[in-house]
Image (tube, grey):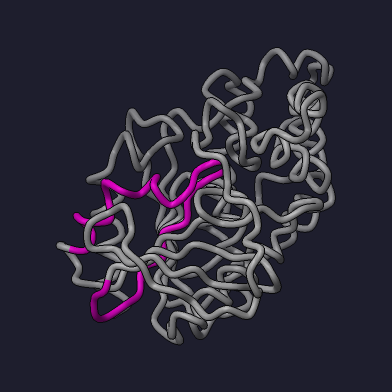
Amino acid sequence: MARVRLPLRSAHRMIPAVILLAVTVGGLAACGNDEEPNRRDPGPSSAPSRPGADRAAGQTLHMVDNGGHRLAFHVTDGHGPTIVLDSGGGEDSSYWKDIVPKLGAATGAKIITYDRAGLGKSDAVSGPWQVEDAVGDLKTGLQKLGVTENVLLVAHSQAGEIATYFAKENPGLVTGAVLVDASLPPLYTDEETARLAAANQPAVDAARKDPTEPRNRQLISVAESYVPLHQAYHRAAWPGTVPATVIVSEKTPFDGSPEDARRWRDAAATFVRQGPDRTLVTAKGSSHDVPKDRPALVLGEIEKIARATS
C-alpha cells in the first residue's frame, strides 16, 4: 500500500478517533451500550449454566462460567446450522435484536448472540484485552450449550478478529462465515498499525483520567495490547476450508479519512483473493453500521451461505 506522507500528529486530526476506536476497541459512549457491565458474581464459579427469561421474546438466557467469570449467551432454538452473531467493539448482544427474529423466521436455525466479557450481562475481566481470551470465551460457551458442529459465524467490526482465530482453531466446527465490515488481517501492516495506535492515543489518555468508568476501562485494556495484538493478527490466516462472505461498507469506519477508507476496502478485497470460496459484497450507501443501515442485505447474505453450507 502507498505510504502515508502526513506526520502522525496530522493523522490525529484526519481520522475520527471515536469511529476508529469503534473498530477495535469496546467502550466509547458514541458506539457503546449504555448499561454498565455486571460486576463479577460472588457465588461459586462452578455453578452450572442457568437458563432464564431473556429481554427478547423467543430467546433464552444462559449464564456460562469460564474460568471464574460469567458470560451471557442468548439462544433462540431452531434446527440445522447454529448461527452465532458477534457484535463489534463496544456493542453487546442487543445490537442484533432486530435481525434475530427475522433470521430465525427465514432460516429456522438455532441462533446465538452473546455478550463478550465486560459488555451487557457478562462479567468484566481485568488486564489487557487478548483475542485468545475472547476466542476461549466463545468456544467454552458453545461447548456448554452443546453446540459441536455446523456453526455459521456472523461477525461485525472487531468481532472479525475473534472469528478469524476461532475459525483457524476450529475449522471442523465452523462451516461458513459472514464478515460484516469486519476487521481483517491484511489491514494491519506495521505502518497502518502504528498510524492507528497514534491516532487512538488522545482518546486513551483521556480515558486514563477516569479508569474506573467501564467504557474507559475497556478502552485502556485494548490499548495496552493494541500494537502487538495487531502485528500478530496481520499474520493470521483464514482456513481455506471455511467459506466466507465479506460485506464491506461503502463509507467504511474511516469516512473522514479517504486514505484509511481506501486501505480498509483494499484489505477486504485482499482477504477475498487470498483463499477459495470467498465472496466480496459492497454495501452501497452504508456506513460502518451495516447491520443497521442495510439489514436486508446482511440477512440475505446469511441466508445464502446457510443454504450453501447446510
- Which residue corresponds to the image point at 41% horizontal and 59% vertical from the top-left? 85
Residue 303 at least partly seen: yes
Residue 96 on the magenta segment = yes
Q: Nearer the viewer, residue 306 or 94?
A: 94
Residue 50 on the magenta segment = no
Q: Percent x, y for residue 71?
A: 55, 63
- Which residue corresponds to the image point at 51% horizontal and 85% vertical from the top-left? 172
Q: Percent x, y for residue 103?
A: 23, 59
Q: Nearer the viewer, residue 120 or 303?
A: 120
Q: Nearer the viewer, residue 16 or 69?
A: 69
- Within the image, what quadrant is residue 285 found in? top left
- Check the picture and name the quadrant holding the N terminus: top right
Q: Which range is magenta? A: 77-104
- Which residue corresponds to the image point at 29% horizontal and 70% vertical from the top-left? 306
Furthest residue to the front? 43
Q: Percent x, y for residue 260?
A: 63, 29
